[in-house]
Image (cartoon, rainbow, N blue to C red):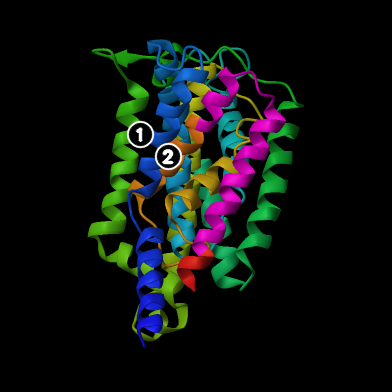
Amino acid sequence: MRGRENIVRLRLRAGGLLSTEHQVLALCLIWFLSSIPFTPGLTSSNNISNIFSNLLPLLIVASGQTVVLITGGIDLSAPSVMGLAAVVGALVMSGDQGLLGGSAWAAPAGLAAMMLAGALVGWLNGAAITRLGMPPFIVTLTTMTFFSGLAVRLTKSEPIYNLPAVFTSIGKGSLFYIPYALFATVFLVGAMHVLLSRSLPGRWLYACGHNVRAAAISGVPVGATVTLAYTLSGVCAAAASVLYTGRLETGSPVLGQRLLLDVIGAAVIGGASLFGGRGKIVWTFYGVLFLTLIDNTLNLTGHSHFTIMMVKGGVILLAALLDASRRR
């Protein structure tokens, strides 16, 4: 009997460790402090600023991915939405070839076009999944391929320059030394947090992820809720594209091409379940911070891009194994 009781206690302790909400934040602190002696310039003001400038847009798009994962789906098209939104906005507001180039309305119209493009792709994903009964993986893989190709086709693989200063200030400007990008990120991510934690649609999202049939029987509008999740993911990807495009001052068709691993990985590392029904925006912030620190420290120590990808892949695989352990 005592042997069985000890086994049960060990399992409970292990389960508690796996479910600790802030364990990834602790890992971030451990990684950062242990890296200081081996990483020159890690604590410099310029490097800290660089960490946060990379973190903010990734946090926005990963927050949208979190909402989709909560419903039990996945959105592989988010990086391609970023590239498409960048191209669409640049084609509207560029001073060289934009439809409204030189106009006072160029920047607002370009910004609106970018957000509309993201929302439209997200809605198309959600509609195909809910109305046609197609698997999310196949749908978003198809849209990722199609819209990535469309962005390249529209620009003939050439980036678009000469964007309005009003627009680029969103990615590079500041107010009282506080970047505009931080204001935008806090607003969008805060809205997503409120949606998930304090609203009826947020409860519907979790219900769809836990058991979609039970949710439908309980009166949850499953189709509209899942479509909302993918639409929000598209909007978040477009918003992240605004920050990246403004900072780079370029409408690039390949923007976000290498971010798919980071976008999904940050949410999973933070604790969002690949099986649905679990996830929080705060947890996603921890995951984004952890991946950003890994990227930054390994870059500063001279490791190649391929080495960094291998390390990230290993971390994400471990997070997925922990997710499966929680589920069991």
Q: Which residues are magenta?
A: 294-323
The magenta stretch spans residue 308 = yes
Is residue 22 depicted above or below 15 in this figure?
above
Say what secondary structure mark 1 lies in: helix
Q: CA distance from mark 2 to mark 1?
A: 6 Å
Say what secondary structure mark 2 lies in: helix
The image's mark for residue 185 is: 1
Residue 76: horizontal and vertical position, in percent? 61, 51
Q: State whether residue 285 appears in this view.
A: no
Residue on which disc 2 sits: 60
Question: Mark 1, residues whose alpha carbon is within 10 Å: few (<14), some, or many (≥20)?
Answer: many
Residue 56: horizontal and vertical position, in percent? 41, 31
User: In the picture, which quadrant includes the N terminus?
Assistant: bottom left
The magenta stretch spans residue 241 = no
Question: Mark 2, residues whose alpha carbon is within 10 Å: few (<14), some, or many (≥20)?
Answer: many
Is residue 18 depicted above or below 8 in this figure?
above
First in sequence, mark 2 or 1: give its number.
2
Q: Mark 2 touching mark 1, by CB under 8 A?
A: yes
The amino acid pointed to by label 2 is Ile
